[in-house]
Every structure is written in C-alpha cells, then in structure tokens.
Amino acid sequence: IKSSIIIDITANKSIEMFKYVLLVAFIAYASAAAVSSSDDAHAEVSLQKSEVRVNGFDTELETSNSIHVVQHGDEKGNINGEYGWISPEGEHVIINYVADESGYHPKSELLPTAPPVPEAIVKALEYIASHPSKEGVQKN
C-alpha cells in the first residue's frame, strides 16, 4: 500500500509539473505570435493612389504599419514629396524632399546638419577675398 501511495503522489506531481510546463509553453508561444504579427514584413497596403497626367503625376501610398509616401512630379522631372514612418521608439519620422536637376534635397528635423563655420575661418575667408593675390608674384 505504501508504494502505491508513493506512486500516486509522484504521478500527481508529474501531472502538475506537466500542466505548469504546458502553461509556460503556451504563454511563450502566444507572446511570440503577438510580436511576429506586428512585424513590418507582414504589413499590408491600406491606400494606393496614382494619377499620371501629361504635365506630371501624383502618387500616394499608406501601409498598415504607418508608412506613408506622397509624391508630386511635374513635366520637367522635378519631384516634391514626403515619406514617413513610426520609429521603434514610437517617434513619427517625416522627411520632405525635392528632387530636381540639382539633385535630391531631403529636409527633416531628424537629419543631421553641418556645424556652423567658426568665426576665425569666416574672418580669414573675408581677408583673402578683400586682398587678392598680385599677378606676376612667383613663389619659391
């Protein structure tokens, strides 16, 4: 009788442990499924418009993961537009741009900018501009 009680207790502990492991596995699976379903790879196009005219075009695109693109083009090949998304930190990223004969010109608060030119350099450039070199002077 004693051995059958020990077997029953051991079996109950095994069943309880199995239930616990099964519960933890289910929670892990559910968490992983929730993370992967919000993945950018599974985003869907929620809006897509395109209009092509003789004098230019307009396009618009939005996706389910908050990516958006808007473009306007003219007959000269100039394009104005913006695109944006939400960063992993939750910040709205928006970049406006112009693409024309002189290149691509993005503008955004998030893009780095060059530091100001130091005052000493500005003064040196002004001095050089106001004192042109003399013709015929040879340097050794």
Image (cartoon, rainbow, N blue to C red):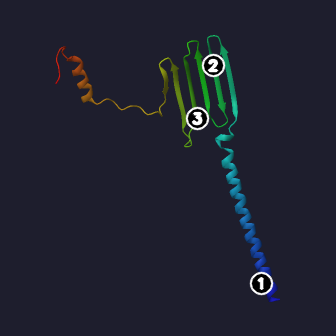
- For disc 3, the neighbor class at 10 Å (few under 14, some 14 to 19, many from 20) is some
What type is the residue that disc 1 sits on? Ile
Q: Quadrant of the N terminus?
A: bottom right
Residue 29, by quadrant, is bottom right
x and y, in percent, of residue 56 in the image: 61, 14
Residue picked out by circle 2: 58
Query: Compared with residue 49, is residue 35 higher up or lower down, i.e. above or below?
Result: below
What type is the residue that disc 2 sits on? Asp
Q: Residue 85 carries which label?
A: 3
Give the distance between the C-alpha atoms of the residues marked 1 and 3, in whole angstroms. Answer: 62 Å
What type is the residue that disc 3 sits on? Trp
Helix, strand or loop under label 2: strand
Give the distance between the C-alpha atoms of the residues marked 2 and 1, in whole angstroms. Answer: 78 Å
Query: Pointer 3 and pointer 2: residues touching (CB < 8 Å)?
Result: no
x and y, in percent, of residue 129 in the image: 24, 18
Residue 131, by quadrant, is top left
Q: Is residue 59 left or right of residue 97?
A: right
Foreground label between 2 and 1: 2
- For disc 1, the neighbor class at 10 Å (few under 14, some 14 to 19, many from 20) is few
Helix, strand or loop under label 1: helix
Residue picked out by circle 1: 6
Q: In this view, does 129 lie to the left or right of 84?
A: left
x and y, in percent, of residue 52 in the image: 66, 16
Q: Quadrant of the C terminus?
A: top left
Helix, strand or loop under label 3: strand
